[in-house]
Amino acid sequence: MFNKSSLTTLILLTQILSNTSSAQESTLAQLTESDFFNDMPVVLTATRLKQSKKNSPTATTIIDREMIEASGFTEIVDLLRLAPGMLVNYDSGHIGNAGYQFLFDRYTVRFQVLIDGMSVYTPIFGEMPWTQLGITIDDIERIEVIRGPSSASYGPNAMTGVISIITRHAALDKGFKFKVNQGVNGRSEQYATMGDSNGNFDYKLSLGARKDDGFKERHDSKELTIANFRGDYQASNNDVITFSLNYNSGDYQEDGTEGLNDTTPDHIKSIQQLAGQSKWVHTFTDGDIFTLNYYQQTFKDNNTYIGDYTSDGLGLVPIDESVTTNRKNLELSYSIYSDRYSLTLGALYREDNTIAPDYLFNTNIDIATSQFFINTELQLNKNNILNLGVLHDDNNTGGATTSPRIALNHHISKNHTARISYAESTRSPFVFEEYTNYVVYVPDLSNDLIVWSDLSNLKPEQIKSLDIGYIGTLNNNATEIDLRVYKNWLTDVIVLDDDLVTGGFLQGNEFTITGFEATLSHKFENTKATLNYTRSTIKAGNLPYGNPAQYETGAPEDIVSLLIMHNFGNKFGGSLGYYYTGSYQQLCCTTNQQAPRKRLDLTLSKSFKLAGYNSKIKLVLQNATNEKIDTRLYNNYDRQGYISFSLEL
């Protein structure tokens, strides 16, 4: 972990490195400024094609750098509150989870999460380790939230959507930057970034140290070290090579996270993440693009402790819930752009390896995945755009599946577009669902074993979705409106019966989700405001496990988020964030229905010169009205605040 002396050394080292490098500029690849700031910004994720939001077959929310900075959030998962339909919750101070339209638990999030095209879910549980990604909020340029089934572009785990995190190009972070956040609840965060150029090579190094005390009445603090490097090399006028390395390690406090009982004692879990990625993009003279993307990543959780099962007559039991997962992924694609159509086709091969002593009874599980996909945008005539896409996936847990999508976008006028689309998506069972074999060694029972074993073959979950949308601009593009009405039919949904003796994963649950989403954004002279509203209902059909009332309250009827950013002048700025979630039942738990949650966040910042260098100080107050926000168990989020200071050299 970082301490004051090591942080001082870090600053001096990066400053020396910065001063010894050249300062030549490099051209940003693929995207120009107009792509982000024209009447309808470009999106990259929905179909793997560069296309306007109004031509996209799926509703898309863009969380840009300005919104990220104004929000005052320090956890990446919290940024998803800025997109309609997203639910954010915490199992503990270091375990955040999110769901789109409904939230079962921290596992099987049912949407794909990408960092610069690198998939980052863990194959054993399908969870998103939000605090173990090896990047910080300051590394993010923008987030594209694809709201709708996207298996036609990204395979089975994009069942309900895609969260695409796009990090900042190295050329955007020239020089030396330092930021420190200090606040209540033991919050202490330090970040340093150094970037420069050497000829056609732009590079940057980011380092960070984070810690906090977690929730009150919980043993759930975290202390993390983060390091990442990114290089962007303009090899020729037509070739760009990008590579990155990121590392994350730290200690988490753990307690009895399922029931806060005495079975699981307070203990420390250590974590480590390492990932490397290289991407080559070649642009042909006619505008076609070839992309080759390869990455590897490793997640390690070292989680051993002595469980106290004395009340069950088993005594003290050694538990090893450690997990190591390794992923290798190779992907290539070829994209064609013309006046009448755009098309991308490609293939992917992935290998996932999982080692989990107790969860999988010391058995290494290897999962191989192959995919072939094609997506196209066809201009039928001046006012009508047809999007077609299909992906074929074959893997060891879900077998072979094919996911299609079709959408028609009608341009009512230059500033108004209507969309209708139909898509089918799947989710393959994750390793622990398919190969459940939890075994615990009990010394007091003469080497007998407690076995929770459920090795039945599960089918992929299925979703069919009908979507009608509208996107338009008013007031000389100062106002943007995005509306979506949808109906989703989910079948073969996998749920967990967590009885230690008879439990296992059950399948066959059916749900229908009907909803409405709206985003209204407006730019005033000195103010920008974005309002999101979601209303949805769940109807349960066939239920082999559970009861309809429990599952039909698995999502709140209403979700609201509002972010207002204001420039006061004289280099003062501020923001107001309001987040409302109606009552719902998190489906992983036997806890009572959660009451509606309200949260008001406020920020105030001042930019100034310090010894001639750009500096900023920011005050952040979270849950300003001190609402009682019970997210789960004893997770009560009280009023919190912190002060941030940043300096650019």
Image (tube, grey):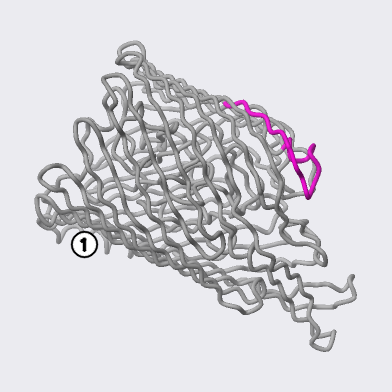
Answer yes or no: is residue 433 visible: yes
Which quadrant would residue 38 be assigned to in this image?
Answer: top left
Where is residue 161 shown, x and y percent of the image?
49, 42
Residue pictured at 65% horizontal, 51% vertical: 91
Say whether residue 552 is magenta: yes
Foreground residue among 485 and 232: 485
The crowd level at tag 1 (other Cα within 10 Å; few <14, some 14-19, many 20+) is: few
Horizontally, residue 163 falls left or right of residue 599, namely left
Q: Which residues are magenta?
A: 534-553
Residue type at tag 1? Ile
Q: Nearer the viewer, residue 326 or 383?
A: 383
Residue 162 to residue 322: above or below = above
> On the image, numbered disc 1 is attached to which residue?
16
Determine which quarter of the picture holds residue 225.
bottom left
Q: Nearer the viewer, residue 335 or 52?
A: 335
**Could you tell me residue 417's position as x and y percent?**
38, 19
List x then y, in percent, for residue 289.
21, 48
Q: Is residue 48 above or below residue 64?
A: below
On screen, residue 439 versus residue 642, left or right, reads: right
- Circle 1 sits in a helix, a strand or a loop, which is it? helix
Q: Is residue 461 left or right of residue 202?
A: right
Residue at the image position 43 percent from the left and 34 percent from the top: 406
**Which one is in front, 452 or 639?**
452
Q: Residue at x 38, y 25 (%)?
A: 409
**Is 305 included in the stretch rendered in magenta?**
no
- The residue lying at 21 percent from left, 36 percent from top is 32
Tag count: 1
